[in-house]
Each structure stands twice: as structure tokens, then as C-alpha cells.
Image: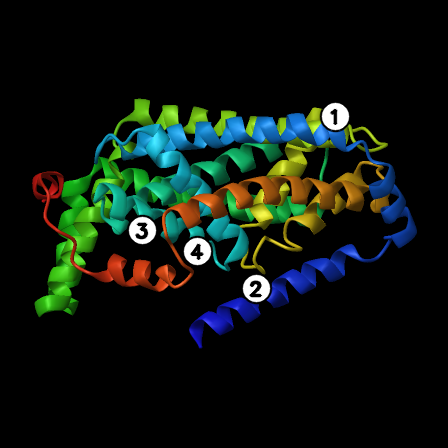
Amino acid sequence: MKRNLQLALGVIVSAFFIYLALPGLHLPTVVEALRTANYWWLLPSVVTYMVGLWVRTWRWQYTLRPVKLVPAVTLFPMVCIGYFGNNVLPFRAGELLRSYVLKKREDIAISTSLATVIIERLTDGLVMILFVFIALPFAPMPEFYRNVVIAMTLMFLIATAVFMWMASQPQRVERFYAFLVNALLRGRVRQQMDDLYHRFMLGLHSLSKPSDVIMIFLTSVLIWLLETVKYWFVMHAFDFSVSFIVLMLMNGLVNLATTLPAAPGYIGTFDTPGIKTLETFGVDPSIAASYTFTLHTALWVPVTLLGAYFFWREHLKIGDIEAARRAAAMQPPNDPAVQELK
């Protein structure tokens, strides 16, 4: 029932965003733009995106270092499986799925792995906001988008500050945590919560040193610049042109919007902000729609197919999402890293 409600909410959000995109679209123009596009430009765009995937893999390897040094070639299939799960399942279930595979392959607790995933999402959000603010002097936004970005900026900054404080002040966090659980929990539930807490704190270790924070942030900037380069390559397949700064703005707004619950594949939440951003800068809405649909497909198809292959190679099935949820809630085996943190 809960999963059905989540899926229904995502479909409603996607339908609302699609509804917002419909006014101004002229279907014959959209079809004609798709028919006459030069799809050879998709080849360098896909290559660029795959390079970005390897950079993402290195970033995950870097955030996992305090726990265990896992080779990038081992992590790359898991990153692709995560994208596959995010693209075909609601509510970013792929993040849990890749943590589940990491637990099976490297015996790293799911709660620890998910802490590193949260670090990735926070830095991604901050980079998207940075892109938007860099673009603002050159590409002003409508007031509504500006207000949304300001609100999300505050949320991401607060969340980042909280996690960095937790990583840098583990003793204080430990005292605060102990005060709460002593008052609320007892017995086996307390024991399980203690294990989850210590595993999660272990995953935050990569935020404990300023040099590590800077490295993770700079890597995230490189990842999203590479993705913007993909936007630039795909743009050349169509009969319009905007500056790279505008594409940075589009990239930022699109990916901030995809943090909202939506139907699998970010239908609507990806497309509408992209169309509206380009429309603001003089691109015909129908041309903008054909470009955004193609870009969305070029982002979705290659990594989803690659992730599906690795998903099949790992002998996984969709039902493993439930197994991952159960594994995340169970007491994990002891290891020296967690005992040292305790």
C-alpha cells in the first residue's frame, strides 16, 4: 500500500509538470524538429556522459575510503545499477539498490553506504545551486524560479552544515544521540538503532576533513560540467543556439526539480523546467520541447541499458529492493572500523 501511494504521488507530480509544459507547444513543429535533428551529435554526448559516470565512481570510492578502499572497477557496475534503479523505480530506489549490492560484494553495511550517498546528493545539490547563481547575472530567471532556488539553497546549506558538524564533532553527536535513545528506546530496538547510528556516522567520515570536503565538491563540479557539455553536444543536433551559461542554468534547474517525487524516469520534472528555461531565452517552445525530450532520452537510455546489464549479471531482481530494506534495518556484523568509532 505504501509503495502504491508513493507511486501515485509521483505520477500526480509528473502529470502536473507535463500539464505546465503543454501550453505553447505545437505538435507538428515538435515532430518536424525531431525528424530533422542531426542525431550524430548524440555520440559525443554519450561518450561525455560515460566519462562523467567514471568520475562519479571515483567520487564514491573517495567517500568510501574511511570505511574500505574498493576498486573503481568494482564500484562502476554498482553506480550503473543505481542509475538503472533510479530510472525505472520510484523515489530513487536505485540508491538503496546499489548500497545493497555493495553490501553483498564488499560487506559494507547499507546504512554506511547510504551515508556516502547522502553526501553525494548534498554536494550535487550545492553544485546545481552554484550553477544557477553563476548564471543569474548573464541569464536572469523568472521570479518564481528564483524564489524556489533561494528556498532550496537554504535547505541544502542547512543540511550540509548539519552533516559536516556531525562528522567533525562525533563526541557531541554521540552525547546528543545517547540522550535521545536513552529516553525513547530499550532492548533489541535500541541495539539495532545503535548499530545503524554508528554505521551511518562511519559513512560521514569523509566530511571530517576540510581537504576531503573540498575534493568531493570539486569532483562534483567536474561531474556536472561534463553533464552540461552533454547538453551542449545535444543542442547542436537542433536548429537553435544558447550560451553554455544558459545550459548551466538549465542543468541546475532541471536537476533541482528532479529531487521532487515523480514517476520513474523523472518524467515531467526533468522536461518542463528544461523547456521553460529555454523558452525564457527566446527558444521556440516546440523546438525546446523536442530538444529536451531528446536530451532526456540520451541521458536515460544508455545508462539504464548498461545498468540493466549489470543488474542481470549480479542475478538481481526487483524484489531485492525489499531485501535491501530489510538488510538496512538488520544488525550488521561487527567490524574493526565500527568498533573504533564506538
Q: Quadrant of residue 252?
A: top right
Measuring from the top left, give residue 285's x and y in whole percent. 84, 46
C-alpha span from label 4 to label 2: 13 Å
Depth order, front residue of 306/12 = 306
| Residue for badge 4 | 93
Q: Secondary structure at mark 3?
A: helix
The amino acid beneath tag 2 is Gly
Spatial CA span between label 3 and label 1: 41 Å
How busy is the neighbourhood of tag 3: few (under 14 within 10 Å), some, or many (20 plus)?
many
Residue 228 lies, in percent from the top left, at 62, 30
Q: Is residue 33 left or right of residue 134?
A: right
Depth check, mark 1 against mark 4: the one in front is 4
Per the rendering, the mark at residue 10 is 2
In the rendered structure, which amino acid carries the disc numbered 3? Tyr
- Distance from the alpha carbon under mark 2 to that under mark 3: 24 Å
Q: Which of label 4 and label 3 is nearer to you?
A: 3
43 sits to left or right of 307: right
Task: Please give the residue where the numbered disc 3 appears in the rendered image.
Answer: 100
Which residue, given by chain and number where applicable, does mark 1 sit on?
243
